[in-house]
Image (cartoon, coloured by chain):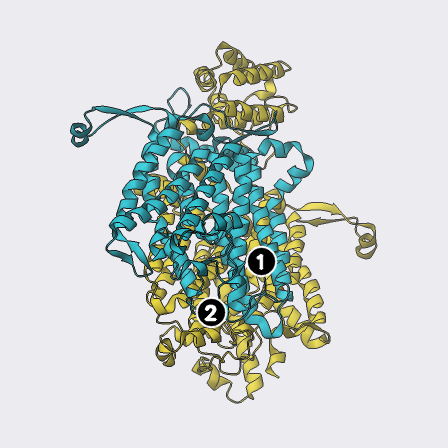
Chain colours: A yellow, B cyan
Amino acid sequence: MLELRHRGGCPGSGGAAAPPPREGEAAGGDHETESTSDKETDIDDRYGDLDSRTDSDIPEIPPSSDRTPEILKKALSGLSSRWKNWWIRGILTLTMISLFFLIIYMGSFMLMLLVLGIQVKCFHEIITIGYRVYRSYDLPWFRTLSWYFLLCVNYFFYGETVADYFATFVQREEQLQFLIRYHRFISFALYLAGFCMFVLSLVKKHYRLQFYMFAWTHVTLLITVTQSHLVIQNLFEGMIWFLVPISSVICNDITAYLFGFFFGRTPLIKLSPKKTWEGFIGGFFSTVVFGFIAAYMLSKYQYFVCPVEYRSDVNSFVTECEPSELFQLQSYSLPPFLKAVLRQETVSLYPFQIHSIALSTFASLIGPFGGFFASGFKRAFKIKDFANTIPGHGGIMDRFDCQYLMATFVHVYITSFIRGPNPSKVLQQLLVLQPEQQLNIYKTLKTHLIEKGILQPTLKAAMDTGKPDALRTLQQGLLKVTGWGTTAASVSHRLFQGSPKHQAGSQCVASPSGRPHTLISPREPARLGSSMQKAFKDGSNQSLNQTLTANISVSRSF
Amino acid sequence: MTELRQRAVREPDAPPEDKESESEIKVDGETASDSESRAEAVSLATSADDTPEVLNRALSNLSSRWKNWWVRGILTLAMIAFFFIIIYLGPMVLMIIVMCVQIKCFHEIITIGYNVYHSYDLPWFRTLSWYFLLCVNYFFYGETVTDYFFTLVQREEPLRILSKYHRFISFTLYLIGFCMFVLSLVKKHYRLQFYMFGWTHVTLLIVVTQSHLVIHNLFEGMIWFIVPISCVICNDIMAYMFGFFFGRTPLIKLSPKKTWEGFIGGFFATVVFGLLLSYVMSGYRCFVCPVEYNNDTNSFTVDCEPSDLFRLQEYNIPEVIQSVIGLTTIWMYPFQIHSIALSTFASLIGPFGGFFASGFKRAFKIKDFANTIPGHGGIMDRFDCQYLMATFVNVYIASFIRGPNPSKLIQQFLTLRPDQQLHIFNTLRSHLADKGMLTATTEDE
């Protein structure tokens, strides 16, 4: 009966009122006492147990004590156990949601720490299950090695992703520069040390167990650590990319449960007998609507919408920017049948809301598969919940199993449809190059940016101050940069003292909104861009000269 | 006694006939019978001998011990000759061979999993394993092809779309496999299915990522592919020889046949071999140049100006060696210095890959990974020491030899938003200014 009270989305197979299993306790070290005696028993018997063909001969993990706080127990002592459980779950749900809001308010750095904390806890929960399944809690070295591998992989990922964002901070410290430049090598060396320790720790009677735990650790790392780092990358893209997917999954849980509770009739999948088609479809539609509305509300605030950046002067994370086009209201004309319904010609939407439909659809249709996967896992290993951390809900992993695939999807979605490569990554790679290569790239980029009109700092300085020597300096600068000779001087002269519209102020400002004003005729930039690329690639000045000739011929059109 | 004849890397404990081992582990996928895979090593049923008839007849006079030694020796030479032929045929064929070796290793390890868990006829599972292999390979090859064949990809419209949305497509394919797995969970077999799922993913992690790193190294220049692999093979052979002639102190309990003398002797011999081999190979352009795809001829070319790494330079010999050799300076390729690092890794850490595989075989009570090569076992047996080498070479190249590809960075830069471009440009400018690379005339600040 308690099962009916479960949220329709993601919980495991069992009731939470039954005292949750004591996996959570196992962390404290009270593993079963028979494990030591088992080591001396026949190995084949033990492996027979582990590798048996069917699940039926696997012993069930004994349940453990109830972790509900005393306060709640006293307050609810009057009610029957069924309602008591419902109230506990409800209160804990509200507590978790308010905690979530609090952390959002505190900012992206706290969110990052929260994600890291959750990742470590999930890893711990899954590894503890492995210990229980294989009764391998006191294998030599193994606990140390599992945590060591977790540390290595986290170090690697943080070096690749988060360190990008601290580039300015890192530039100042010599030792950190060394760490960044050889980051992959250091991470690999650390991992190798762990691998060699594993090989040296292989003990005669426990080979198979040790290999199982090794594989278990690696699969867990693959699941939890990579997902958490993708979450953090999404977060840095803008908090809205973190909030809307997670809320969509949570909303899908809750609304699918509610629809299933009130209208549920047709079972969905044999794996989770409480799920129903009505819940599934009802949850889908309500999640799409919820995502749409949440996206609308959040898109207004710069705090949610802007990419997170690290400002070295303030030494903290800031989210301030010009919102991109995705977060600016645009007018969409409605298709005819909606026009009749809403009696409006057009509607103002944020483009992000269209994307949110895709995200909510994924959360409702594919997200539950993550829940089914976790349910299957729990049935396979005959556990009720992953752990006992949250009273009434089970472990952290129980709450996050549906999020599992969502983070990867959002990340892939962003990189495929929203933006290209990670700019900090490009920057990091730039900084790793040899200085000569950096200088070459710098010159190429400068030329490209000037030609696109995105960058004219020297021009602006020249124009603003009106000093003629600044212009001369600029001409000489062009000479030095491109080595083009006197033709460059004439080009620059012509460019900068041409028609009045190229004078100060009118378009000499870098425009982050992405609508560049070009000095050169707008017909040409793309071709010049690719030929610039080719020029760099060939590494010779021949093609640069050809490009310049094309440039001059274009500029003569002024 | 025949064990003494084995190459020092591998660890059979039983007479050689049993190495042509359990028919259950034959790679053509016969159904496993329950007990043999877990039986004690010595009592394995003898099965068909895979040695070709020709060899059998030629060696029929010798005793079984020598026969085995000859079989192994002949197969070793055959494999080395095959390796040379493939190198001659060029990078494209090498890439295909690497791909085939990867698929074969995957198949061998998955088959072991079937045998261990008696799960050969789990619903859907064979299909899903191969499907995941296909997905992950598609993902990695797409990334590689997009990098190296950028111009080709840009020309063809369907390829361009495939490469632009490559990650999304790969992720979708993987998701389909994941959902199929969840839908295929059957009531009594949950645990087995999860085990096989985990087994497949760990195998993919080991086998497929390594093979793609090998291909990356190959594209960097064939010398980066040949020298590491040869060093590992040489270390195998040399450690065995030294162990055979001088071996006395055991090295590790896991592999009782390994000795410290073999280990150390193999180390020095491999370093010397690496130096000589890289000296010989650095002279040839076809080994040294990065593999590039030529648009015009629509094929791979290895033609370039060799980088500084592959030009003879003069090094001063330290005092202590000067008196020995009698020369003050010596002409070497800088690459030879790097080859010392590669050989050192191959001799010191490479064997750990072998120990890992030995432990794995003992854990699951199998003699060899499979039965493909007569006298040697499966493909995986031959490549277990290479396991870590490919990753090391790749990390080494990325860290010490070259940074990222500058033109690729420019391409990525051009796809960014203008404000991001500006931000990167400004950061780069301040970085260069800090370094003093920008003089007042190039920069107006």
SS at mark 1 in the image: helix
Looking at the rendered structure, the kind of residue marked 2 is Arg
Quadrant position of the C terminus of chain A in the picture: top right
Residue B370: give x, y in percent of width and height: 50, 56
Quadrant position of the N terminus of chain A in the picture: bottom right
How many numbered badges does the structure rendering display? 2
Question: Does A155 appear above or below B112?
Answer: above
Residue A220: give x, y in percent of width and height: 47, 62
Residue A406's mark? 1
SS at mark 2 in the image: helix
Q: Residue furthest front?
A: B61
Left or right: A92, with B350 as reference point? right
Left or right: A434, with A541 as reference point? left
Q: Which of these two is toward me, B327 or A399?
A: B327
* Mark 1 → mark 2, Cα distance in angstroms: 41 Å
- Residue at coordinates 40% horizontally, 26% vertically from top-left? B283
Q: Residue furthest top?
A: A486
Asked if one can make out residue A342 in the rendered structure from this viewpoint, the answer is yes
Looking at the rendered structure, the kind of residue marked 1 is Met
Tag nearer the camera, 1 or 2? 2
- Residue B2: quarter of image: bottom left
Residue A458: give x, y in percent of width and height: 47, 24
Disc 2 sits on a residue from what chain? B
- Residue at coordinates 57% horizontally, 67% vertically from top-left? B119
Q: Which residue is mark 2?
A: B38
Disc 1 sits on a residue from what chain? A
Question: Does A58 appear above or below A223?
Answer: below
Asked if one can make out residue A367 in the rendered structure from this viewpoint, the answer is no
Q: Which of these two is toward me, A318 or A143?
A: A143
